[in-house]
Image (tube, grey):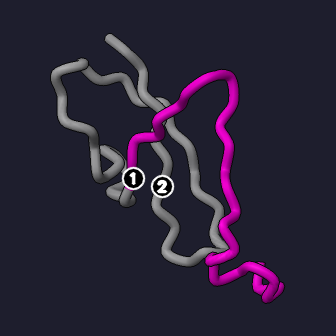
């Protein structure tokens, strides 16, 4: 069974997401809630050799120093 990477969906832009490895069948629908904690999660799609987070300048924390 493949292992997928999931991350929490932070309630605030200043909160860092938590990452989880969850085994699922390829036929299963991606999870929207962590099976144990109930936190909102999304599947992370990885490509290549690194995950790149792009800062497009539209974040509520961009330049404001709130984080």
Question: Which residue is at the far front?
Answer: 56
Q: Residue at x 62, y 77 (%)?
A: 58
Q: Secondary structure at mark 2?
A: strand
User: Image quarter for residue 64?
Assistant: bottom right
Q: Quadrant of the C terminus?
A: bottom right
Q: Real-space Cα distance between discs 1 and 2?
A: 4 Å
Image position, residue 41 (x, y; %): 39, 53
Q: Residue at x 48, y 30 (%)?
A: 21
Disc sitting over residue 3 in the figure: none
Q: Residue at x 76, y 86 (%)?
A: 66
Image position, residue 3 (x, y; %): 42, 20
Q: Is residue 58 magenta?
A: yes
- Indicate left or right for 53 with 18 as reference: right
Image position, residue 9 (x, y; %): 46, 61
* Residue under label 2: 8
Q: Secondary structure at mark 1?
A: strand
Image position, residue 33 (x, y; %): 30, 52
Please tell me how crowded label 1 is: few (under 14), some (14-19), or many (20+) other residues with Cα within 10 Å: many
* Residue under label 1: 41
Is residue 29 positioned above or below 53 on the image? Answer: above
Q: Are marks 1 and 2 in contact (CB under 8 Å)?
A: yes
Q: Which residues are magenta?
A: 41-67
């Amino acid at each position: 069974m493949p292992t997928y990477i999931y991350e929490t969906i932070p309630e605030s832009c200043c909160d860092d997401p938590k990452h989880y490895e969850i085994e699922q069948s390829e036929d299963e629908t991606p999870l929207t809630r962590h099976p144990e904690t109930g936190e909102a999660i999304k599947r992370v799609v990885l490509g290549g050799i690194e995950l790149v987070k792009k800062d497009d300048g539209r974040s509520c924390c961009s330049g404001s120093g709130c984080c």
